[in-house]
Image: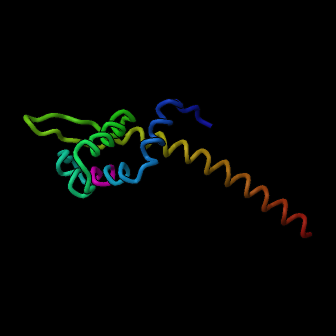
Amino acid sequence: MVNYSTPQLDSVFSALADPTRRAILAQLTQGESSISELETPQKMSLPGLMKHVNVLEQAGLVEREKKGRVVRCRLAAEPLKNAAGWIEDYRRFWEQNLDSLADYLARQKD
């Protein structure tokens, strides 16, 4: 299995654990958004939204850029690729083990 950087992977999975942050990321898959555009569908206060955006930014999942008075956010997908790779390694591990178990059980029937 690939050795993944635990602190970054931990922060990505921690950020993804919250449904509001997942909704923000889903919105950002449609393209760059301002903070106010992110705030509207979440129906929460600006300070509450900013806490979520900060967690996503610290995990490397969101990049912020200030243009004049407007702060715009965009998705940074690389940490998601690393998390998906980690999950894929474990998927393969469990599939191999379950295949071996199925083979064993099939041999026991004979």
Position of residue 7 relative to residue 76, above or below, is above
The location of residue 48, given as percent across then percent down, is: 29, 45
For the point 27% across and 41% down, the residue is 50
In the image, residue 94 lies in the stretch drawn in magenta: no
What residue is at 48 percent from the left and 42 percent from the top? 13
**Quadrant of image for the N terminus:** top right
Residue 1 shown left or right of residue 63 in the figure: right
Q: Which quadrant: the C terminus?
A: bottom right
| 10 displayed left or right of 104 | left
Residue 11, placed above or below residue 16:
above
Which sits in the foreground, 43 or 84?
Answer: 43
Range shown magenta: 25-29
Residue reaching furthest left? 68
Of 48 and 34, which appears nearest the observer?
A: 48
Q: Is residue 51 above or below residue 99?
A: above
Q: How many marks?
A: 0
The residue located at (84%, 66%) in the rendering is: 106
Q: Is residue 95 above or below residue 69?
A: below
Is residue 44 shown left or right of residue 105? left
Q: Which quarter of the figure has residue 49?
A: top left
The color scheme shown is rainbow
Task: Confirm whether the magenta stretch covers residue 26.
Answer: yes
Which x, y percent locates residue 17? Answer: 46, 48
Left/right placement of residue 93 relative to residue 84 reads right
Q: Main secondary structure of the magenta part?
A: helix
The percent position of residue 76, horizontal first and vertical second, equals 32, 40
